[in-house]
Structure formats: C-alpha cells, structure tokens
Amino acid sequence: MASLMRESHPLTLKVMRLSRPTLADSRALPMDSSTAVLAQALREAEQNRPTASGQIFSDLQLSDAQLPLDAFPLSEALVLPRTFGTMFLGETFSAQMCICNESAFVVRDVAVNVVMQTATQQVPLLDNSATQLAAGQPLNVQVAHEIKELGTHVLGCTITYLSAQGEHRTLQRSFRFQAANPLVVKTKVNHLERDVLLEVQVHNATHATLVLERLRFEPSSPFAAEDLNAPHGDTALLWGGSAGFMQPGDARQYLYRLRAPVASEEASVEQERAVQYATALGKLDILWRGAFGSVGRLQTSQLLRKSPGMFLIEVDKAEIDKTDIAKDPSVTLETPFCVRARVRNVSENAMTILATVDANKHPLVMPCGPTRHDLGDLAVGEAREICLEFLPLAAGVQRFGAMVFVDSVSGYTRELGHLLEVFVA
C-alpha cells in the first residue's frame, strides 16, 4: 500500500491581513419603563430561547443612564475582523507575517522573500537578509502593497533556511485573493465649439459608506480644465460636512469644461489639428476614506473621446465690429452692423476660396451688403479677414450668418450653419 509522505519543516508561517477594527455591538440594551408590557414579553422570549451572545436586555432604565453611550447599541470595545474581507482597487494591502521555529534546534540562515503576483506583473515586497532563529523564536515582518489592478492577486512567500542537519531547505506558501472595483466611473462627452464638456458619474459599488475627500481632473495637452462643480472655487460645499458621504449604491455627478487654446493668427495648422484631433482628455484622481479613516486612492486610465475632426476651411474668429462690444454686446433693431470674420485654410494644399452669405436661412437678420466675397489664393495655414454687413429685422436673440465656402481649385465645399448669435434690442 502506497503512503503519501508530506514534507515537514521546523519553521511555520502564519499570515494575517492587517485591517481596521469595528465597534462591538452592545450585549445589553436599557429598558424603557413606559413599555412594560412589551418588555415583559421580550424577557419571556429571551428566557425561553437564549442567544449565543448572552443577555440582550439589562435592568438599567433609559432614565437612569448616566453616560450617552449607556443607551447606545454600540459599545466602546473594538473587534478585530474574523475573515479576510474584501480588497478594493486603490486600497493598500497590509499583512503581518510570523515565521516561528517550532523545533528544538537552532535554524540558521533564515531568509524571507515575498512577492505580489498579478495578471500582468510581479512586484517584490520583501527580501530580507539571512538570520538565525533559536528554538521557539518567532520572526515577525510586515509587508504592504497598493492595489492597482483588478482581479486575482497572489501573495507568494518563499523561506530558505539551513536545517540542523546542514541541509538547505525551502518553504513556499501562497495566498490568493481578489481585488474588486469600489467605484464605477461613467463619462459623457459633449462638444461646445472648440471646448469639451465632460460629465462624470461616480457610483459607490461597495457595501460600505465611503467619504469622498477629493475628485480632481488632470487634463491632457492641449486642454485646460475648469471645475464647474464648486461655485466661486468653494470646494467646502462639495467635500465638507455630509456632502462627501456616499452610501452603498449612491452616485454623484460632476461637470468639467476642457478649454482648448484660443485660435490666433500665429497658431500653425499643426497646432489646430492637435486640438481638433486630440482624443485623450485626461485622468480622474479620486481620494476617499472608509471605515475608521482607511484611505483609498484611484486614478482612472486616460478618458477618451471620439475626435470631431476638422474642416479644411475654418472660421477662426467672428465678432461684431463695435467699439463698446464688451459693455454692450447687443445690436439695435433695423440698424445695420458689421461682423468681422477670419477665414483660414487648414488643409494641406493651397486654396482659392469664394465665400457666399446665404440670405434665406436666417430671414430675421438679413445681409445688407455684398453676399459674395472672393478671398483669393490662401496658402496652407494662411488666414484672411472679411467684413460682412447685416440688418436685424426682429428683436430677441437671433442666429445669423449662414455661409458657404468653396475652393475653386479642388471643388471642396463647406457649409456653415451660422456665424454668431446676437441680442437685438
């Protein structure tokens, strides 16, 4: 009959995850004398069916409670976790490792090597020098690792030592656990001319309450981020008090505006293309706290958008030709006004551009000057300014300036829905 022989070692290895404690439940709750009938029934039920935790109700009346905690269902005692629990992305895994010499002899040259193995990499956590352990002597070490990946993690421990017989031996143990996602981040991208409006939704996917301490957006080039969530930059309304608390299943929404560099005459075609064809918007950096102040930090991967691309003919700038436009951006009813527009060739070839104003698309603001403008030959990246005259015929906010641009060389045509919006007073 074959027998299975398991290799024995003089050393034992025990690993315990270092977790935050919890408050212990109070074993006895005070009685309210005003509910004597209910109290008597509950005491009879307690006597007939005793619980494993002992007495549930105490003889202390609520009116006799001397301290605020006397009537509180939680005690001042702390309870260590009995199970491994759940590890979440962004948290720090910490463990206490105890290597003990259970033999009656001295074990020499004890070396400990600890690594964290994930699906993509192997991270060394500990590689201490050789030491000597007397009979019954323990060796305690601590390791820590920030969880940056989802899925399976394996804590691999390798102990090499020299036995009492002078043999080099190896003790290997592995501990496997899963890392879950604590926060689900969803985004929505909207384009506002050259700028981008980014909507962010953060959902608490855990079974515990989290407190958001910071949510910061780090934009990618060439964008600059503007936080639209805190009015006047007062972040206390977002993270102060109870505003940052997220119960399990709760969601929070945030809004950011990513501003593109202002188009100028000095900007090259390559710079304009870098803005229009940029797909990477940036990253979100989230910091939160859990039970007993445990810290978690999560940084998303690059948030991407579908590039809107660019037209071969662009209107870099269009503004009403008015000296006090900054103080009074409106125009007067039935009074002609001029708009200056700068047209740029952003293609890879020279163009001969003809611009035409469509008088039928916006009948409430009619063109009152020439509707056809020959811009002539424009080299790659070259811009030319034209002056257009309009006559407002109705009060209120009006769109105007529908145009068609045609390149007589290649036949390329671009239709522009409107140049500007204006308030007619």
Image (cartoon, rainbow, N blue to C red):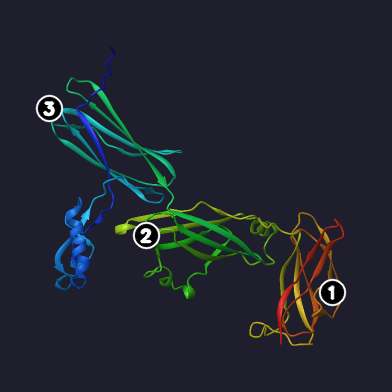
Q: Which residue is mark 1?
A: 360
Tell me the tag on residue 104. Answer: 3
Instruction: Give the amino acid type for the residue marked by disc 3 in the picture.
Output: Ala
Asked if marks 3 and 2 touch (Cβ < 8 Å), the reply is: no
Residue 84 quadrant: top left
Q: Which quadrant of the figure contains the C terminus?
A: bottom right
Residue 99 quadrant: top left
Q: Secondary structure at mark 2?
A: loop
Inspect this view and state whether residue 223 appears: yes
Q: Residue at x 63, y 85 (%)?
A: 327
Inspect this view and state whether residue 27 appears: no
Q: Which residue is mark 2?
A: 209
Instruction: Give the amino acid type for the residue marked by disc 2 in the picture.
Output: Thr
Categorize mark 3 by other alpha carbons within 10 Å: few (<14), some (14-19), many (20+): few
Q: Residue at x 51, y 51 (%)?
A: 301
Categorize mark 1 by other alpha carbons within 10 Å: few (<14), some (14-19), many (20+): few
Q: Is residue 19 above or below residue 320?
A: above
User: Real-space Cα distance between discs 1 and 2?
Assistant: 59 Å
Residue 271 on image: x %, y %: 65, 58
Q: Secondary structure at mark 1?
A: loop
Residue 118 on image: x %, y %: 42, 39
Instruction: Give the amino acid type for the residue marked by disc 1 in the picture.
Output: Asn
User: Real-space Cα distance between discs 3 and 1?
Assistant: 101 Å
Q: Which quadrant of the figure contains the N terminus?
A: top left
